[in-house]
Every structure is written in C-alpha cells, then in structure tokens.
Amino acid sequence: MKKLGFIIAAAVLSFNILSAQQLSDKGLYLTSEGELFSGVITSHVDNVRSKITVKEGVIAGEAEYFYASGKLMETGIFTEGKKDQKWTRFNENGTTSAVAFYTLGKKTGTWLVFDDAGKKRFEMNYTNGEKAGTWTNWDENGVVVNTKNYNITN
C-alpha cells in the first residue's frame, strides 16, 4: 500500500512539474510564479513525446522528438526559438531518413532524404530559405530519375 501511495505522489508531483510552465501570449515559457522559465520541458502530443531546452523563456538548445514506441524520431537545435543548425530525422527502425540545415529558422545548405533502407533518394539545396542549385532525385537502384536547377535571382 505504501508503494502505491508513493507512485501516486510521484505521478502528481511529475504532473505539477510538467504543468508548471505556461506559454505567455508573447510565446515565452513562464514558471507558475510568472518568471521566465529555464530548463527542460517534456511534453506528449499526438503520440509524439518531445524534450526541449528552454532558456529565459525561449526555446534554445537541444530538442528531441520521440515516436510512441520511445524511439528517437528527430533531433536538432533551436536558437532564439527558431530551428538552427543540423536537424536529423530517423525512421522507427533507427535509420536516418532526413538531414536538414537551418539558419535561425530559414532553410539553408544541402538537405538529404533517405528511404527506409538508408539509400539517398533526394538532395535539395537552399540559400536563405529559398530553393537553390540543383535538386536531384534517385530511384531505389541509385539511378538519377530527375534533376531540377533553381537559380536565385537577386
């Protein structure tokens, strides 16, 4: 009986800790006292569990998203509340399914998409959030099936 009481108390405490952060109308995470929150927030929405780092009310730092199975779905970095740097997505088998890059929320660099076997299927390029350079698509045998060139005009 004591064990059940401890489990219930731990669950209530966990719920209170998780719900202690509030999102303000300005999009900042606050403590229950109204102070800017810094720490790690774990949430569960639509069968996806997320673990994000918040610094002074803003998402900043590591972020991880997990499938309902608990396996890692995606990982990346936020800076000033925006996706930044390298983001990697995995299928439920743990194989990399996509690699993307951002600069403060804008798509940048070479993005790659892989099939379930880990073979490269798409390569796309971005500059300052815009499609750029040559985009290539391969079939399951590694044969190029399509290319398209995006020239940026200034």
Image (tube, rainbow, N blue to C red):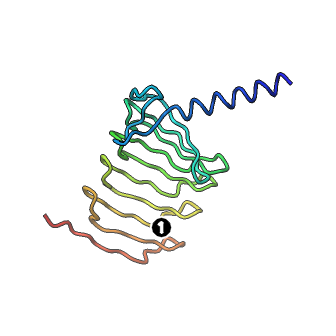
Q: Position of residue 114 (x, y in %)?
A: 50, 62
Amino acid beneath label 1: Arg
- In depth, the one of 88 and 83 nearer the eye is 83
Which image quarter holds the N terminus?
A: top right
- In depth, the one of 38 and 151 nearer the eye is 38
Quarter-wise, where is residue 60 in the image? top left
Q: Residue at x 43, y 74 (%)?
A: 144
Q: How many marks?
A: 1
Relative height, residue 99 to residue 11 (above, below): below
Name of the residue lying farthest toward the bottom: 145
Left or right of 107? Residue 113 is right
Q: Secondary structure at mark 1?
A: strand
Q: Position of residue 112 (x, y in %)?
A: 43, 59
Relative height, residue 25 to residue 18 (above, below): below
Q: Position of residue 31 (x, y in %)?
A: 46, 29
Relative height, residue 2 to residue 153 (above, below): above
- In depth, the one of 31 and 142 nearer the eye is 31
How crowded is the residue under tag 1: few (<14 C-alpha within 10 Å), some, or many (20+)?
many
Q: Residue at x 83, y 21 (%)?
A: 2
- In depth, the one of 10 and 120 nearer the eye is 10
Quarter-wise, where is residue 123 in the image? bottom left
